[in-house]
Amino acid sequence: MCIIGSSRRQRERLIHLLEADEATVSGPAGRRRADRDRMIKSFERSAAGRPVSERRCLRPPAVLLETVGYVFHSVLPRAESVGWPAVYAFCVDRLRAVRQDLTVQQAAGPQALAVLRRCALFHLYADYRSRDCPLDVFDRHINTRQLQECLLGVLRLQQAQPDGPTELCERFEAVHLLTSLPHERRMHERWLRPTNRDLRLALEFRNAWELGNFVRACRLAGEMSPLLQLAVYRHLAALRQRGLRVLAAAYGSGSLAVSAAAVAGWLGYDDVTDLRCDVTQCARLTERGDAVFDRKLSTSQVKVPDRGWLSLERALRDPARLLAVCQLTDDTQR
């Protein structure tokens, strides 16, 4: 897709597994041959006496949009065969190079906006997909920083659109509200009475979060679209931790048994078994599997791990359809 620099990378033996010719994929890394149809420009930092990117190497927004589309439709589905860590490292580097080209050109317009929206979507998806990965494979702090850079670029370009805020613009405002919790507190005038469903759900979730109403927050999360659920997923574990401490304080008489199924519904668990694993930190389980909370443990540090979300698992079963599921297939006109 991008043959600029491919000869140098071939000489320096920097051909990635996902760019190699099929005949050399299984061989040693130093002997891989480049497949010109799979090559994508890699990210390079600026150096003394050398510009960030030469003019002849800059890709226009239309090419960048095609490149990002290739990443979603052809690279992400290969995670099952080559492994998610290799796919994640490759996509992060190549999408960073895409954003670098946009920055150097100071590109604007619908195509540049579509590119940044897709980059933001990748980092949302990566946050969910990498929930069980070790720190040397996935660093959530770095991923969050890159996500925020993408979202800030999206919001900046959306404000410059001549037609005003569209439905998709408001959807990404909702994504920004959810990912920036609890720091984002600025309120726009049109947010006081939102007409867009996604923006309304995001604002209601934020209000429930600030009020500590974990039951309403989990219920609202279940009503969101897949794009917003990817944005809110990062807060689920903290929400459940807070909820378990509150329940331990409220029902911690030592003799009152609370139905595990009811608690699972309050906290948005898909499986009661997962709830029973987490609730043992502040309660004991009866023979029937119900929870008897201990008020003494309500102030303890409850640790709830990130778990899979059934609704997202169903929606994201096929990574090649990620753009379609999140309604980003025809956003260059919106």
Image (tube, helix red, strand yellow):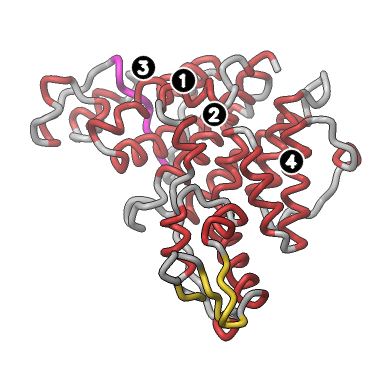
Q: Is residue 97 visible?
A: no
Distance in Å between CA atoms under marks 2 and 4: 22 Å
| Residue 203, quarter of picture | top right
The picture quadrant where one finds residue 223 is top right
Q: Which residue is mark 4?
A: 201
Q: Measuring 46% from the left and 22% from the top, which residue is drawn there?
A: 321
Residue pointed to by mark 1: 69
Cα separation between marks 4 and 3: 40 Å
Q: How many marks?
A: 4
- Name the residue beneath numbered marker 2: 118
Magenta span covers which residues? 37-46
Q: Residues within 10 Å of mark 1 (few under 14, many from 20)?
A: some
**Residue at figure coordinates x 34%, y 52% from the top left:** 133
Cα separation, mark 2 vs mark 3, equals 18 Å
**Which of disc 3 and disc 2 is earlier in sequence?**
3
Lower sequence index among marks 2 and 1: 1
Q: Nearer the viewer, mark 2 or mark 4?
A: 4
Near mark 4 (Cα within 10 A), the count class, few <14, some 14-19 or many ≥20, is many
